[in-house]
Image (spheres, rainbow, N blue to C red):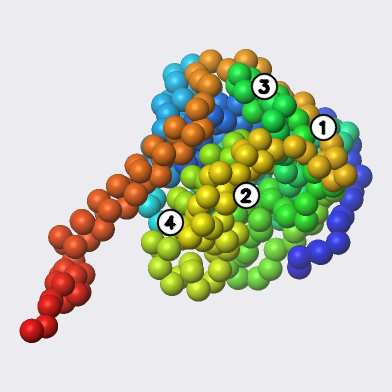
Amino acid sequence: MQLEAAYRWRLTVFESGRRKVIIVGVVRTLNEDDIIESVLRHHLKLCDRIIVLDDGSNDDTAVIVRSMIEEGLPLDLIEIRCVVFDEGNRNTFLFNRARDHHAADWVIFFDADEFLDMRNAGLSLRAFLQSVPGEVDGVQVRLVNYMDAMTDNEHELVVPARMVWRHTVPHDVHKIMMRAGTGITIRPGNHSADRETGSLTIIQNQDILFAHYPRRSGWHDIYKWVIGRLKITAAGAKETSRGTRTHYIAPFGILLERPEQIIQNEGFFRQTPNERIMSQNPIDYLGGALRYTRVTNYKMKCVSMILKYSYELATEFGKLVDTDQAARKRIDDSLKIEP
């Protein structure tokens, strides 16, 4: 049974000698070299280990993660390129790997731009999860978006220290923390989960938040829109018909038909927070100093990431044409010119 209303519980008293819960974080990455080091260092203060699945980054994301592994940090890096949208399968793969390879009791899902914020919880993540009743399979917590502002210090490498303006009221969008189990699939976006047979008991907590930094620059927004929409389109009707990531459609359409409305809009690139709905509320960043992150020129990165992904997509299409006779015939037929 999935409970819709928020559910609060009492912290149970730890039994003497009780084994601590093993917490494994899992994150998928794509072109996140401006933020990946800080998000991993932050969550390593909360989790026993983190598994990183890189979907084929064309920047230094994987390089940074490998450097952190060489530093001796408890990280796993799996690199499996994915030129189309395939979130559900990959999320479930990470869940199973955390359970089977690291004996996880709980699996914490977060995106590369999301930082767990425990300030209002009144206890640590480990104590919180230790207190969750045994019949509960998962806990949903809310997202709250932070935004870039023209007053940000562009030389500050730690994104949560640079971006301090957030929506005052958290959003009605949830992320899932799941107790490790078998026969469970994780939905795209890590918002919820399903059991192959039977139901799950999933409750909500209002005190824990995920601080979300989805846009670190206007140029960052642009390449996310373009690559995101192309990946979904390349996945075919399986994703387009179900409305996956529909929020990419409108801005992508503007870039296609009326690009000047965005590219020549100074306010789009130099935002001023709306203080009626936003306030300064920086999180407690736990990760300490960064060692491998560099200042990002988002404009140059935008051009590079779009071109690299487009070339990657074209390369995969070329391989398909070379190896699939039906695809080759379809192309040949489309090129015929009737007399």
* Sequence-first tag of 2 and 4: 2
Residue situated furthest bottom in the rendering: 339
Q: Earlier in the sequence, mark 4 or mark 1?
A: 4
Disc 4 residue type (three-letter): Lys
Please state which of the two labelled residues, at mark 2 or mark 4, is closer to the viewer.
4
Foreground mark, 4 or 3, reads 3
Q: How dense is the environment of label 2, judged by Cα within 10 Å: few (below 14), some, or many (20 and up)?
A: many
Q: Which of the labelled discs sits on residue 153, or is there none?
A: 3
Q: Position of residue 309 (x, y in %)?
A: 37, 46
Q: Do the residues bearing badges 1 and 3 touch, measured as CB atoms within 8 Å?
A: no
- Measure the C-alpha gap from mark 4 to mark 1: 34 Å
Which numbered disc covers residue 281? 1
Q: Secondary structure at mark 1?
A: loop
The residue pinned by badge 2 equals 180
Residue closer to the observer: 53 or 261 = 261
Q: Earlier in the sequence, mark 2 or mark 3?
A: 3
Residue located at (78% from left, 56% from top):
172
Which residue position holds label 4?
Answer: 231
Residue, x 48% and y 69% (percent of image)? 240
Residue 119 coordinates in the image, percent (x, y): 83, 32
The three-letter code of the residue at mark 3 reads Asn
Among the 4 quarters of the image, the one containing residue 265: top right
Earlier-in-chain disc, 4 versus 3: 3
Disc with the residue nearer the chain's start (2 vs 1):
2
Residue 173 lies, with reference to residue 101, above or below; the image says: below
Please state which of residues 77 and 179 is positioned toward the viewer in this rendering: 77
Question: From where the camera sits, is residue 111 visible?
Answer: no
- Quarter of the view holding residue 186: bottom right
Q: Residues within 10 Å of mark 4 (few under 14, many from 20)?
A: some
Secondary structure of the residue carrying numbered label 2: loop
User: Can you name the residue that lies furthest to the right here?
Assistant: 10
